[in-house]
Image (cartoon, helix red, strand yellow):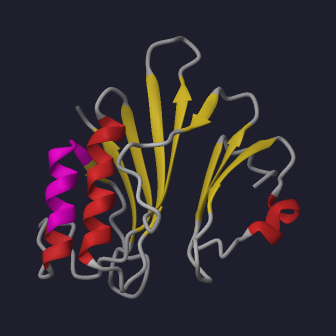
Amino acid sequence: MLLESYDLVAITETWWDESCDWRAVIDGYKLFRRDRQGRRGGGTALYVKKWIDCKQLTLKNSHEQVESLWVRIRDRGNKGNLVVSVYYRPPDQGEPIDEAFLLQLPEASCSTVLILLGSFNHPDISWKSSMASCRQSRRLLECIKDNFLTQVIDSPTRGDAILDLLGHQHK
């Protein structure tokens, strides 16, 4: 990471908790993180170069079981803001928690450009045809369309499925 000098680095399934504070620091980067609450596993993190003007957002539609992290990055030329979201969805996540996450998307994207990335774990989605067999997956597809997002990863990330997504807005 330090050799390539990335401006942003997103991580899902960190498995971090409060005991990992000192081990998670990387010189030259600000760290934003959302640790899973109440059980092991999961979690998200975003490293941002220290010179980048950014802050973590607290959304009105936040839900304690939704493993999402939202960071606003201010443009150096004051041309607008960018919101980066890192999301982890456990494969066995229930529909109410999925819906809680989907409510966060329009709130975060209403006035800025949005980059959405993470492990979404919807193996039944065909991204080439925008079709899915599971209702929860179809709701994700609908929400991505409603929020003017384009999913750009086009090769499988696990087996034959695209579980990890990178979406950007095209308003």
Residue visible at 83% across and 41% down?
A: 28
Indicate whether residue 127 is drawn in magenta. no
Q: Nearer the viewer, residue 31 or 96?
A: 96
Q: Position of residue 116 (x, y in %)?
A: 40, 51
Residue visible at 45% across and 13% down?
A: 79
Question: Does 80 appear above or below 122?
Answer: above
Q: Position of residue 139 (x, y in %)?
A: 16, 65
Task: Report the span colored magenta.
Answer: 139-149
Residue 136 falls in which quadrant of the image? bottom left
User: Is residue 74 among the parts visible in the rendering?
Assistant: yes
The reply, left or right, for residue 36 in relation to residue 130 is right
Residue 18 falls in which quadrant of the image? bottom right
Question: Does 51 appear above or below 100?
Answer: above
Residue visible at 43% across and 83% down?
A: 158
Residue visible at 70% across and 71% down?
A: 16
Q: Nearer the viewer, residue 93 or 134?
A: 93
Q: Quadrant of the N terminus?
A: bottom right
